[in-house]
């Protein structure tokens, strides 16, 4: 495995490259995570694929700019990474934020994408493929309220790395999610903000900029442009009728979409908790493409 810093679009991104000559899979993490989130699933894919893990801007060991978090901008950053690695095409596995970026890549840069696996970007926040049940005016009021909360919530600062780790452990233990893989993600993401003090994740301004765009994404503008084979990872026995309808509707817009339902769903943490069913479904999908 080779760890490298890649300069793209005036920022530097951290990349891990498990080099070999076979087709590549690029893994794109969810918001608040980093490339360490994939450690538990690497053995499923490592013998058959070149694996490339990317810290998206604002995460892990990559630079933390205040802007540039629209899914299309982040997709251009990933295109830059591919250029630096002399990689023409790849399979993409994206979770939540990473799914949005991967979807943008497949829609706007189809020549770069062999296939697409999405754990996220399965419904818009509003609109005909959205989960919002009120009026558009009510939705905009909701968005304004959420952005205000982000602005008014202090950036968490911890007096030590140990204090940060203890706080995150307490939060995740409430859900019985804390394990060595999630611990590694949290530890890797921590960064020093001053003498002995630590923080984690995107800053407030970056988070606000990302969320302002996210609330208004219309994924139905992207799916009709997706021509490559597409696997959508959905919750088994989903009890939200609007969300289920959105997933089905979006899948129908793409040219080659398949939905697989995963039991014991814990989006987006399943990759670190119980990934076997998900990884087996992905391998079946990928092996089917090779036949």
Image (spheres, rainbow, N blue to C red):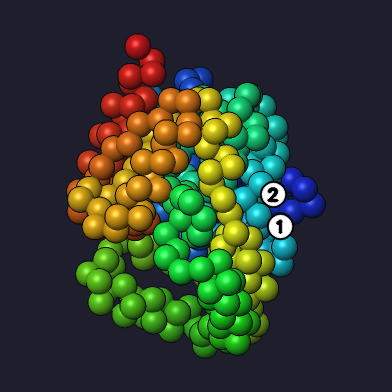
Q: Residue at x 32, y 36 (%)?
A: 259
Quadrant housing residue 257: top left
Question: Foreground: 136 or 252?
Answer: 136
Which quadrant, please, contains the C terminus?
top left
Splitting the image into 4 quarters, where does residue 133 fall?
Answer: bottom left
Q: Which of 58/129 is in front?
A: 129
Q: Is 37 rendered above or below residue 43?
A: below
Residue 215 in view: yes
In this rendering, the answer to whether 179 lies above or below 248 is below
Tell me if residue 123 comes above or below residue 65 in the rendering.
above
Residue position marked by numbered label 2 in the rendering: 73
Contact, mark 1 vs mark 2 (Cβ under 8 Å): yes
Question: Residue placed at 33% from the left, 21% from the top?
Answer: 287
Q: Position of residue 32 (x, y in %)?
A: 49, 64
Secondary structure at numbered mark 1 = loop
How many residues crowd mark 1 within 10 Å: few (<14), some (14–19), many (20+)?
Answer: some
Residue 282: percent from the left, percent from the top?
Answer: 33, 33
Q: Quadrant of residue 191?
A: bottom right
Classify residue 122 as left or right of residue 15: left
Instruction: Decide: is 39 above or below 171.
Output: above
Q: Is residue 24 visible?
A: no
The answer to whether residue 173 is left or right of residue 290 is left
**In the shown orientation, is residue 76 left or right of residue 224?**
right
How many circles with numbers are drawn on the protein?
Answer: 2
Q: Residue at the location (42% across, 33% down)?
A: 252
Find the residue positioned furthest to the front.
Answer: 135
Q: Which mark is residue 68?
A: 1
Sequence order check, earlier mark of 1 and 2: 1
Name the residue rendered at 35%, 48% in the picture. Answer: 245
Q: Position of residue 51 (x, y in %)?
A: 47, 35
């Amino acid at each position: 495995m080779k760890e490298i810093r890649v300069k793209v679009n005036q920022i530097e991104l951290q990349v891990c490259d498990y080099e070999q000559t076979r087709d590549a899979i690029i893994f794109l993490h969810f918001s608040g995570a980093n490339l360490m989130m994939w450690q538990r699933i690497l053995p499923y894919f490592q013998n058959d694929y070149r694996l490339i893990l990317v810290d998206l801007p604002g995460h892990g060991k990559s630079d933390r700019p205040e802007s540039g978090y629209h899914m299309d901008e982040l997709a251009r950053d990933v295109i830059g990474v591919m250029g630096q690695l002399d990689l023409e095409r790849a399979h993409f596995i994206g979770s939540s934020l990473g799914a949005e970026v991967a979807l943008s890549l497949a829609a706007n840069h189809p020549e770069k994408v062999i296939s697409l696996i999405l754990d996220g970007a399965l419904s818009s926040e509003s609109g005909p493929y959205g989960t919002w049940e009120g009026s558009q005016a009510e939705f905009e009021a909701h968005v304004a309220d959420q952005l205000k909360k982000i602005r008014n919530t202090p950036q968490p600062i911890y007096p030590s790395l140990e204090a940060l780790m203890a706080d995150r452990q307490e939060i995740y233990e409430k859900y019985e999610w804390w394990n060595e893989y999630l611990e590694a993600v949290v530890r890797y993401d921590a960064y020093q903000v001053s003498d002995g003090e630590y923080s984690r994740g995107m800053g407030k301004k970056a988070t606000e900029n990302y969320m302002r765009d996210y609330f208004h994404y219309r994924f139905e503008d992207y799916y009709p442009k997706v021509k490559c084979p597409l696997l959508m990872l959905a919750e088994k026995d989903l009890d939200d009728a609007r969300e289920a309808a959105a997933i089905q509707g979006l899948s129908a817009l793409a040219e080659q979409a398949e939905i697989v339902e995963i039991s014991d769903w814990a989006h987006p943490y399943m990759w670190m908790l119980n990934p076997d069913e998900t990884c087996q479904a992905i391998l079946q999908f990928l092996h089917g493409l090779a036949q």
